[in-house]
Image (cartoon, rainbow, N blue to C red):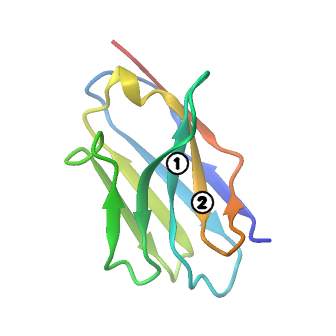
Amino acid sequence: QVPLVESGGGSVQAGDSLSLSCTTSDRSGIYDMGWYRQAPGKEREVVAIISWTGDRIIYADSVKGRFTISRDNTKRAVTLQMNRLKVEDTAKYHCYADTKPGDWGEGTQVTVSS
């Protein structure tokens, strides 16, 4: 089990930006990581995934052009920069590590109002 700690969530207005951070104490870090989100009454959905080398990235269509995922393996951190936030981005964002079977962070809340 790999412990994941998220931070950076908050309440903002549409058009604003937030940066989420996920850190782990795991010394290896050789696995894909990413961010998922889940809104009340909805299923969890993928937001962005990044390979351990950082050269392969996948974004949900809904966030392409607005969100940027990156990682710094020296700092053992994954960052999700979210720009031009929309109301529909409101959800609890969870960090994920593809450690097989996989590990999840407890999540950080992002609330966007119009």
The residue to which callout 1 is attached is: 36
Element class at badge 2: strand
Q: What x and y, as percent, mark residue 48?
A: 40, 56
Q: Is residue 51 above or below residue 89?
A: below
The residue to which callout 2 is attached is: 96
Which residue ends up furthest to the right in the rendered image? Answer: 1
Answer yes or no: is residue 40 visible: yes
What residue is drawn where x is 28% and y is 40%? 83
Left or right of 75 on screen, residue 113: left
Is 47 in front, or is 21? Answer: 47
How packed is label 1: few (under 14 Cα within 10 Å), some, or many (20 or more)? some
What residue is drawn where x is 29% and y is 43%? 63
Quadrant hosting residue 41: top right
How packed is label 2: few (under 14 Cα within 10 Å), some, or many (20 or more)? many
Q: What x and y, as percent, mark residue 24?
A: 66, 69
Marks 1 & 2, CB-CB < 8 Å contact: yes
